[in-house]
Amino acid sequence: MSAATALRPAEAPAPLTVAIASKASLRPAWQQLVGALKHKGWPVQVISNWVHELPGPASNWNEEWRASIDEAGRGDLLIARVCVDDRADVVIAQVGAALGAGKRVAILGTHPLLDRLGADPLVDFWVPGAGLEAVEDALRTRRMLP
């Protein structure tokens, strides 16, 4: 073994990547979730750019929606917050991207189009405020938490 190999620090496991699908008006709640995750020190990275920086009025919303759909397919976990009366078109597209990529989806709330996914083994339904619990469940499933 060379000296360089002996001094190489052990690699930390990759964090759980989480994408968020939700109405932009709920952004403050998602920012609180990000803060709670940091406070707990859990190995989680929220990859949804809109949670960190809301697009401005001059933004190209087609590009923003496409980016959020791409993020949903890249994350290890998608947290989708819906209400029964939401239009939810982009959220539904994000759920489809995540499931198409074989990723877990935590649906917070209920929506007639998404309720049909109840038998899918990658989908879990949670009450609307259970984002932290959904992340904790995903971490425990991956044995990233005791």
Image (tube, helix red, strand yellow):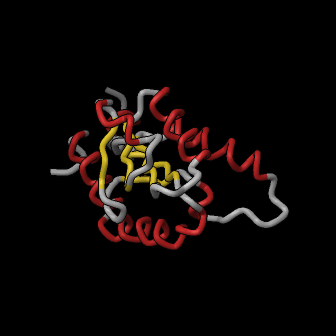
Q: Position of residue 66 (x, y in %)?
A: 69, 41
Vertical relation: 31 (above or below) 145: below
Q: Position of residue 29 (x, y in %)?
A: 46, 70
Identify the residue at image location x=22%, y=41%. 141
Q: Is residue 71 left or right of residue 67?
A: left
Q: Nearer the viewer, residue 76 or 59?
A: 59
Q: Position of residue 131 (x, y in %)?
A: 35, 59
Q: Position of residue 22 (x, y in %)?
A: 53, 56
Q: Quadrant of residue 115?
A: top left
Q: Nearer the viewer, residue 44 or 55?
A: 55
Identify the residue at image location x=38%, y=56%. 109
Vertical relation: 84 (above or below) 32: above
Quadrant position of the N terminus in the picture: top left
Q: Is residue 97 left or right of residue 120?
A: right
Identify the residue at image location x=53%, y=35%. 73
Q: Nearer the viewer, residue 69 or 82?
A: 82
